[in-house]
Image (cartoon, coloured by chain):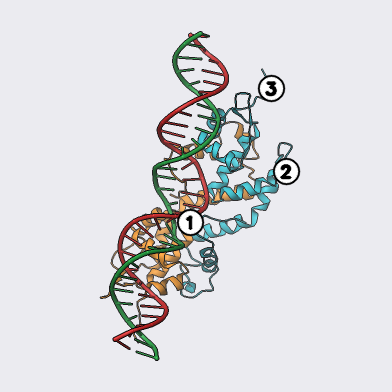
Chain colours: A cyan, B orange, C red, D green
Amino acid sequence: MAPVRELTVGQVAMRSGVAVSALHFYEARGLIRSHRTAGNQRRYSRDVLRRVAIIRVAQEVGISLAEIAAAFRSLPEGRTPTREDWNLLSTAWRDGLDHKISQLKKLRDGLTDCIGCGCMSIDKCPLRNKEDRLAREGTGARRLVVG
Amino acid sequence: MAPVRELTVGQVAMRSGVAVSALHFYEARGLIRSHRTAGNQRRYSRDVLRRVAIIRVAQEVGISLAEIAAAFRSLPEGRTPTREDWNLLSTAWRDGLDHKISQLKKLRDGLTDCIGCGCMSIDKCPLRNKEDRLAREGTGARRLVVG
DNA sequence: GCTTGACCTCAAGTTAGGTTGAGCTTGTAG
DNA sequence: CTACAAGCTCAACCTAACTTGAGGTCAAGC
């Protein structure tokens, strides 16, 4: 038995909890990579599991696939990313994440800062201004933007 | 001059920072309400601004319009909601928000709990299990779900 | 009384993030 | 050596959340 077996799509799907179609999709978007067998089937190295896990966690907090892909591009090409590499990545997201955390806390704590205050009638509220910027960001569905 | 003037869509759009088309859309989705003038134009009472502000803040942290609408349905029908009413609403969202906050912190702090740990190779990680559940939640675009 | 800008409705288009299905190939177990 | 599950590709479909456009109405100024 080989010590470090490569994984098939089905295996990755099962272990990561995402659908095969989603894995295809992530690959098309450049978020994960595979090589092919002689018979044109995908084979993944184990670190794809880590990538997928990060994708899901990041998505869950509102980071778009495009941003995740961008962040992933900062990972080393040749070798399997180390713990350090991943930490760098999350550092890059840090500011955006910090902001989002504070937004969430405000909402959780009774929207005190911006709903309970008088700023809504005027336009110097930090939240409202943030939104104004968002409002100009093009068409289609709006997603949370980090960084 | 009337002391509490009603607002036109254009005015609401300007003061809230969202497009007129978005206001129409929110109304169609039951998030805000208006009555019509003799000439069939929308008129809004002032508290629509508060609603819209909440919509935007909630959206920014990943709550869907459907969920916001559901929460709004718990607001009093007849009178203008008080500060207390809004607080109740955010209390209802609290658990979901708490969860999301902790996810964000994990991501921010180097993903220590679930990416940096060994749980990714196995399936007892709280994060991963969360995703497994999510994976079964139907078709279409996935959104963050609170509550 | 007419022009001009703000409104109205309704249908169609857009982006993100996938899923579904058809039609065809691979690989493994019996 | 033959099933038949698992893969592959590609096009079509789906939801959320809006925007855009066409075609028509309303109202305030000149």
Which residue is identified by label 2? A84
Residue A90 position (above or below residue A137) = above
**Chain of residue at mark 2:** A
- Amino acid type at image mark 3: Pro
Query: Residue beneath label 3, please?
Result: A3
Question: Please, what is the three-letter code of the amino acid marked with disc 1?
Answer: Gly
Determine whether B64 is above or below B128 in the image: below
Give the number of callouts.
Answer: 3
Quadrant of the image occupied by residue B32 = bottom left
Q: Residues within 10 Å of mark 2 (few under 14, many from 20)?
A: few
Q: Mark 3 belongs to which subunit?
A: A
Mark 1, other Cα within 10 Å: few <14 / some 14–19 / many ≥20: few
Q: Amino acid at mark 2?
A: Glu
The quadrant of the image that shows the N terminus of chain A is: top right
Badge 3 density bin: few <14, some 14–19, many ≥20, Cα 10 Å: few
Residue B35 image-quadrant placement: bottom left
- The answer to whether B52 is drawn above or below residue A40 in the figure is below
Q: Viewer-nearest of labels 2 and 1?
A: 1
Pinpoint residue A135: horizontal percent, then vertical percent.
51, 64
Residue wearing tag 1: A140
Q: Earlier in the sequence, mark 1 or mark 3?
A: 3
Q: Secondary structure at mark 1?
A: loop
Q: Gap between marks 3 and 2, in whole Å?
A: 24 Å
Task: Residue A121: give x, y in percent of width and height.
Answer: 46, 75
Relative vertical location of residue D18 with respect to residue A75 in this rendering, above or below? below
Q: Answer whether residue A110 is visible to the viewer in this image.
A: no
The residue positioned 48% from the left and 61% from the top of the image is B57
Q: Helix or strand or loop: what does disc 3 sit on? A: loop
Residue at the image point whose x is 64% and y is 43% from the top: B112
**Residue contact between numbered discs 2 and 1, judged by CB atoms under 8 Å:** no
Q: Which chain is disc 1 placed on?
A: A
The answer to whether one can see residue B66 in this image is yes
